[in-house]
Image (cartoon, rainbow, N blue to C red):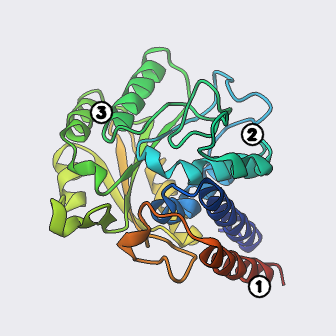
Amino acid sequence: MDEMLRKQLEKTACKVRMGIIEGVYNAKSGHPGGSLSVADLLTYLYFHKMHVDPKNPKMPERDRLVLSKGHTAPALYSVLAQRGFFDPEELKTLRKIGSRLQGHPDMKHIPGVDMSTGSLGQGISAACGMALSGKISSEGYKVYAVLGDGEIEEGQVWEAAMFAAHNKLDNLLAIVDNNGLQIDGKITDVCSPMPITDKFEAFGWHVITMDAHDFDDMERAFNEAEKINGQPVMIVQKSIKGKGVSFMEDQVGWHGTAPNAEQYAKAMDELKAALEKLEG
């Protein structure tokens, strides 16, 4: 990847993380851990890979993204705000009465949101429907779906996996955010979905692994994905829950806990310092 592009993506991802913390802190509730772990991925997609237009969010030829792990909406909202779909100041209204930024994505009211999600396992099924529609109508858009590694304990995910492979949905690219933690603890202790790569391969998908926090590796993975024909693609990204905020990293307690004023200040100071270093 071009160094200038990588630097820009790193700076944008840092701003996205700041938006996540801003939103969850003002809401006094939400899911910062898993939002921070997908911040780099969503930044890469919306600022480099996906064909979208903030001035025309419903254009028919746009690429679609389904956040199947819908509780990490703070990450999606922050990326959409940075991309220009709405004012970043609106992030402060997260989960407040009257706000369109609900705790889970709402396609009816939020520009840039392609599917309402939240019930785990359902998003990937919706993405399959979008992809099949694109194949039938011969439209050239891609459908991206982001799942949690705890989410894939849901049986509906594997029904969707069979459907996608059976229908050769090579316009569908899904990503499992493998941070190893879910609300009740380690995924391997709760109901292990391991080995994730082998399972999706057995269901007929082309599987790629990547480092979720390395834009060069991300570029390699997505370039490989774009060469695959006749199969849906699954990228399993190894990530760190809470990435970017030292005291949140790899801590299951930050799955669904909002920072208090002191923690908010510390998190924002860390992110501001990281951004200044990138801009220096």
Inter-mark Cα distance, 3 to 1: 43 Å
Tell us which disc is closer to us: 2 or 3.
2
Instruction: Find numbered disc 2 in the image and state the secondary structure of the residue it sits on.
Output: loop
* Amino acid, disc 2: Phe
Residue appearing at x 57%, y 63% in the figure: 40
Residue pointed to by mark 2 = 85
Residue located farthest toward the right when viewing the structure as drawn:
280
Q: Is residue 157 above or below residue 33?
A: above
Foreground pick, 173 / 194: 194
Q: Image point 63% across, 37% down: which residue?
A: 97
Image location of residue 36, percent across then percent down: 53, 65
Looking at the rendered structure, the secondary structure element under dot 1 is helix
The disc at residue 277 is: 1
Q: Earlier in the sequence, mark 1 or mark 2?
A: 2
Report the residue at 67% width, 24% height from top. 58
Instruction: Answer with mark 3 or mark 1, whichever residue precedes in sequence.
Output: 3
Q: CA distance from mark 1 to mark 2?
A: 27 Å
Q: Which residue type carries mark 3?
A: Ala
